Image (cartoon, rainbow, N blue to C red):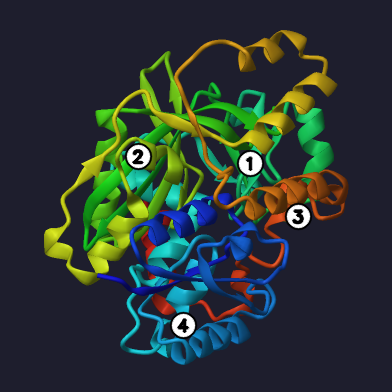
Amino acid sequence: MMSRILVTTARMWYSLNTIRILAKHGHQVYAVDSTRNSGGLYSKYVKERFLSPPLTSEPREYIDFIVDIVTSKNIDAILPSYEEVFVLSYYKDLLPKQLKILISPYPVLAMLHDKYHMTRYAERLGIPVPKTLLLKDFRPEEWQFPVILKPRRGRGAAGVKRIKNLSQMKAIMGTLNSEEYLVQQELPRVQYCTIGVAYEGELKGNTIYKNLREFPESGGTGTSRLSVEDEKITDYIKRIVKDLNYTGFFAADFLYDKNTDTYNIVDVNPRLNPGIYAGYVSGVDLPSMYIDLLLNPESVRTAFSRNGTGSYTLFLEIGWFFSTLFKGKFRRLFSIFKKGPKLKEDVWDWRDIKPFFVVFWIMLLSVFAGPFYGGDQEFVVEGAKFDDKLIEKPEELIELEKENIAV
């Protein structure tokens, strides 16, 4: 059954994957973003594209714009890609009643997005977490260096710092808002990521993948990804989804500590991530599953990725290569030439070439402009980040946070 689907924040390359997958299944795809530097807007598979107000600074204007598109174009469903999910959830009552969207209540999304409260919540469910507290509560005698310092509501590796000793900690503490930063136990950087979709408390589809390389080289967005199977991680995700009666996309990051054979959850994002295409080539078509759950949820069978398939992003692999080269880590360079699993490139498509060059241009631009925005990733998502300070905090969220603090 063909539907008119609006894909939001089309700049992310996994938004582009989503657009192509939905079009392949016969859906009519519309795309919206707040910048013209958005690869998905230039896809041949997009019927019509729109330029919205930035949701970062104008969330109410953004939602009004979305409502206008939905009404004027008879949109059947919205598939959110990035942090607009918070705005769409907060203002859900303003969306047309006939519009379909899989989304959890705003207090649930906001709690999971806050790394401090997410960590406390995971502890309540018996899910392993690294030792974590707010910077304001840091007592050096209770910790061993090095430690990790990170924003409570950051994205990617933006703002994350490795603090080697007490002198370095003292020097940086006065420059940060101690309520908005976490101190976290350093764990081995063996990261496993997930992306799935849930419906009314049941995990319907999920992909677990391991980043083979990341850009920046020191840690960030995966440039190549390999799917894996792991019952422990799957169980932890199911536990959260069931407890929250969660609906929508669900992504999480875990750090594996081989000394204790423990997967520690360190981040949750209620949105898409780069694992979408890695899952797709593994037989887990999350974009189509999302639409099917909207139209006929009883017909949707669960699907979980298998071992050994994956994807890579060519322009990010190039970025990793030069990042590693400039840091003089020459031995690591050879890993890109080693024979390994056959991965599929997730941006290039000879039938739809414009988006590749747009996305590549954005990456090059971010190298030069990134430092003025707080980093490469922050430049790329400028205008698409959610700022909770611009909306009123719901009472339900306050109650959730109280429960977590009581752990």
Mark 4 against mark 2, which lies toward the viewer?
A: 2
Label number found at residue 207: 2
- State the separation of the CA atoms marked 2 and 3: 28 Å
Q: Quadrant of residue 197?
A: bottom left
Q: Amino acid at mark 2?
A: Thr
Residue 349 left/right relative to 169: left
Residue denoted by label 4: 91
Mark 1 against mark 2, which lies toward the viewer?
A: 2
Residue 229's x, y, as percent? 30, 28
Mark 1 against mark 4, which lies toward the viewer?
A: 4
Label 4 sits on a secondary structure element that is: loop
Q: Amino acid at mark 1?
A: Phe
Residue denoted by label 1: 138
CB under 8 Å between discs 1 and 2? no
Mark 2 or mark 3: name the one nearer the start of the chain. 2
Rendered residue at 57%/35% (across/down): 222
Label number found at residue 379: 3
Rendered residue at 78%/26% (across/down): 322
Mark 4 or mark 2: name the one nearer the start of the chain. 4
Label 3 sits on a secondary structure element that is: helix
